[in-house]
Amino acid sequence: LYNLNVVVSPFMAELATRLLVSENGKKIMEAHSLERKKRNGLVDFYLGKYTCLGDNDSLFRWLILPKGVKENIFVMEAKKKGVVIFPSEKFAIGMTAPVNAVRIALTTQENIDEFEKGLRILLEILEERM
């Protein structure tokens, strides 16, 4: 198991709090919400015929892989083509059997065009496997 301790200095906590309650904080949160909705719309557009869990405000989506598509092989193929995704087994807890799925992070790629390119690559891999 991995353990991660995060400590935020009182100064940074105060700064973040002041920003969040200010008009600028509200504008930043609205812009991020709009960006998430756009990216979730792209996920629905490209991967809509597959089961993709999450809603239009999610930070990540779970792509349930079709039968016959193994998550580790899918992850490796995506990585070879420049797309980094994570298998569900990385998120399974205890004795829970992981679902045959991958997690797609929506906000790690700053450029939306690059994000869309990644979705097209994932779709291409899925269609090659079907």
Image: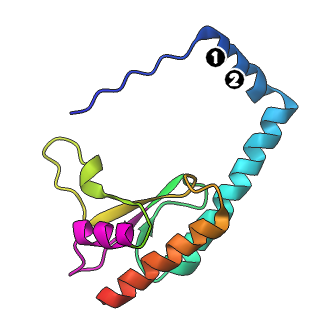
Q: What whole-number distance in Å separates the C-alpha atoms at marks 2 and 1? A: 5 Å
Q: Is residue 128 magenta?
A: no
The quadrant of the rendering that contains the C terminus is bottom left
Q: What residue appears at the point 87 percent right and 33 percent down from the top-left corner?
A: 23
> In the rendered image, which quarter is residue 115 located in?
bottom right
Q: Nearer the viewer, residue 90 or 37?
A: 90
The quadrant of the rendering that contains the N terminus is top left
Q: For mark 1, give the secondary structure.
A: helix
User: What residue sits right under mark 2 in the picture?
Assistant: 16
- Left or right: residue 48 versus residue 85 is right
Establish if 86 lies above or below 79: above
Measured from the top left, where is residue 95 in percent x and y?
12, 45
Q: What residue appears at the point 64 percent right and 57 percent down from the top-left corner?
A: 36
- Number of numbered discs overlaid on the protein picture: 2
- The residue stretch that appears in magenta: 62-80
- Left or right: residue 14 versus residue 56 is right
Measured from the top left, where is residue 41 in percent x and y?
62, 70
- Estimate how packed mark 2 is, as few (under 14), some (14 to 19) or many (20 or more) residues with alpha carbons within 10 Å: few
Establish if 125 lies above or below 88: below
Q: For mark 2, give the secondary structure.
A: helix
Q: Are marks 2 and 1 in contact (CB under 8 Å)?
A: yes
User: What residue sits right under mark 1 in the picture?
Assistant: 13
Measured from the top left, where is residue 48 in percent x and y?
50, 79
Residue found farthest to the right: 23
Q: Is residue 78 magenta?
A: yes
